[in-house]
Amino acid sequence: MEAKADIAFENVVYDVRRIYGNGHSVTIGTDVETTFSFMKRSIFAGVAYDAEEKEITANPVISVESGKFVLYGSGSGGTTLKGNVEIRVKGTAEAEVAGAYMNSTVDGKVTVTVEDQASLSEFLGEQNKGSAKELELILMGSPKLDGRTFRGTVNGTPKGTLNLRQASLSPEQAEKFKDFAEILKADSSAAEENLLTKPAVEVETEAMEKEKAAEEAVAIEKMIAESVSNFSDPEESDFL
């Protein structure tokens, strides 16, 4: 199905394999039942690979409140969507989400929001050779994280922001997220936020440097104490 206007589904049995939004908004409301199929039910914000115009300008919203879907902020391979895309997963919905499909481009920001009680079974900000100019994944409350793959990108360099300021996740759940350039946590200091985004080697090096500095400080204090004890007047000490 290729949308020619905004489209919405509610209180239906849904049996569409793919929807290309063509830059229009797609809404899956309440009580939508997705029938069993070996082929996943996919919704693309952009256009199909064989569309006449492979580059469009739009600011679509994909909102899913029930059913089981795979959601893409882009079109399929070889296409470009210029604009900002919002993907919202809430209610009883279960979704796999990718900001940019393989070999596709979003020339704008893809913002994905997953609310309490919904299920996020997979997240890839950028699939292989896909590209999004900006990415943000926002978790609210305690959504279910049933899968294993939750990555900002698979293209090498960490990408996007993981926003956990409104989330209630266990440490084990938070550790599932990889390859994000920035992680924002509720009530965390800047130092803690930096710790979450730095490579393990860098964090370990900093810890060793702090330990060494502490040892040096103790040694200096000992030297000062010993030096002071050798003078009747502490002001004569070279260390004071």
Image: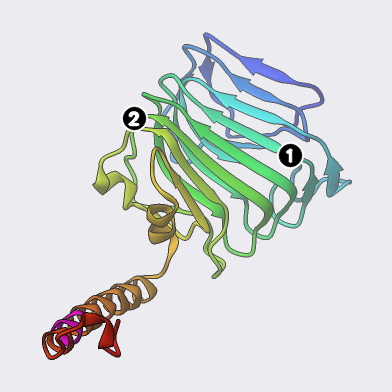
> Is 188 or 222 nearer to us in this picture?
222
Which residue corresponds to the image point at 47% horizontal and 20% vertical from the top-left?
66
> Residue 207, relative to residue 168: is it above or below?
below
Task: Indicate the amino acid at tag 1.
Answer: Asn
Is residue 173 in view? yes
Q: Is residue 12 left or right of residue 62?
A: left
Instruction: Residue 58 in the image: state x and y as whole percent.
Output: 81, 36
The residue tagged 1 is 84
Circle 2: is it few (<14), some (14-19), or many (20+) Cα within 10 Å? some
Which residue corresponds to the image point at 42% horizontal and 53% vertical from the top-left?
193
> Residue 9, relative to residue 134: is it above or below?
above
Mark pair 1, 2: CA separation? 26 Å
In magenta segment, residue 128: no
The earlier-in-sequence mark between 1 and 2 is: 1
Instruction: Residue 5 in the image: state x and y as whole percent.
Output: 80, 22
Q: Which residues are magenta?
A: 221-225
Instruction: Tell me the quadrant of the picture where the C terminus can be found.
Output: bottom left
Which residue corresponds to the image point at 56% horizontal and 11% vertical from the top-left?
10
> Residue 215, relative to residue 177: is it above or below?
below
Q: Which quadrant of the view contains residue 136?
A: top right
The residue tagged 2 is 142
List the single residue furthest toward the front: 232
> How is the protein colored in the picture?
rainbow
Q: Which quadrant of the view contains residue 35?
A: top left
